[in-house]
Amino acid sequence: MRLKDYDNDDGKRVWLSDDELTRFIEQAETPHQRLAFLLAGRVGLRRSEIIEVCPQDLVDGPTGDHIRVWESYAKRNKYREPPVPQEVVTIAETLAYQQDDDEPLLDVAGSTVYRWVRRAADALEEETGDRGWQYLDVHDLRRTWGTYLLEQGVIPSVVMSFGGWEDWDTFRKHYLGEFSPEAIRRERGKVDFLKGGDESAEVVHPGTMGLTETRSTCR
């Protein structure tokens, strides 16, 4: 887990390692909670977007399974299509079995999703003794997702498209200059007097992939 102070607010930004994110998702007590955690941590949805997802928003095309995320669900005038893992499709299909295609899969308020996340984080804090879990918010799951994609070598302009970021300067400030716990561990492994890193793993700096393409895309 990596923590960083906010510039002007209390609390801290949180980046989970992939193992920690998996462990967090496993804390879900119901299929609805698990879907919410996956939509945030594996699809990059905002809290307000998680509660609006309907069965009809899941689509299968030539590039695989995606979800249509509408900027204004009522107007349905602008959307993006981030890819989704198979587990999201499976849970969504199960939950949608006895409901209409245009009904939200999670019939809860955004505050409920927040409470689910906090309850799971509190359980992990008690289990692990790591006080960092007390800072975890729904947005930190999206933050973890975006950073992970960049470090996997996904072109920044594609990550921006998946996540719905339109302002290049904001995206560069909050994502291209940040690292996941995995990246820090790998870099640590390059220092001979530090133990526990992985010297053989190559780390992709988010700021080095496709910048020319990204700048032209964001204009």
Image (tube, rainbow, N blue to C red):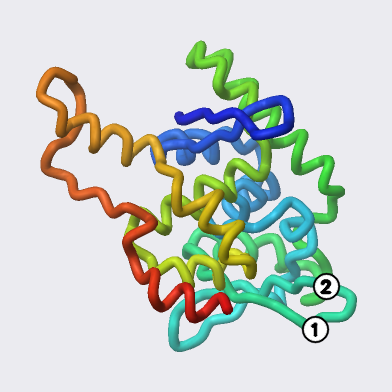
Query: From mark 2 to mark 1, how far is it between C-alphas?
Result: 7 Å
The residue under label 1 is 77
Instruction: Name the residue: 73% across, 65% down.
Output: 53
Judging depth in this view, the residue of 92 and 67 nearest the camera is: 67
Furthest-bottom residue in this view: 62
Q: Residue 212 location, x and y as percent?
A: 39, 75
- Element carrying mark 2: loop
- Residue 72: mark: 2
Q: Residue 113 location, x and y as percent?
A: 76, 43
Amino acid tagged 1: Asn
206 on left or right of 49 = left
Judging depth in this view, the residue of 25 and 194 nearest the camera is: 194
- Element carrying mark 1: loop
Instruction: Name the residue: 68% across, 26% down.
Output: 11
Question: Which numbered disc flags the more N-terminal residue, 2 or 1?
Answer: 2
Furthest-right residue in this view: 74
Q: Residues within 10 Å of mark 1 (few under 14, many from 20)?
A: few
Q: Residue 176 location, x and y as percent?
A: 45, 54
Q: Quadrant of residue 192?
A: top left
Q: Are marks 2 and 1 in contact (CB under 8 Å)?
A: yes
- Residue 129: mark: none
Q: Residue 13 location, x and y as percent?
A: 59, 34
Instruction: Name the residue: 32% across, 41% down.
Output: 183
Instruction: Name the residue: 33% across, 65% down.
Output: 209
Q: Residues within 10 Å of mark 2 (few under 14, many from 20)?
A: few
- State whether residue 138 is above or below residue 3: below
Amino acid tagged 2: Ser
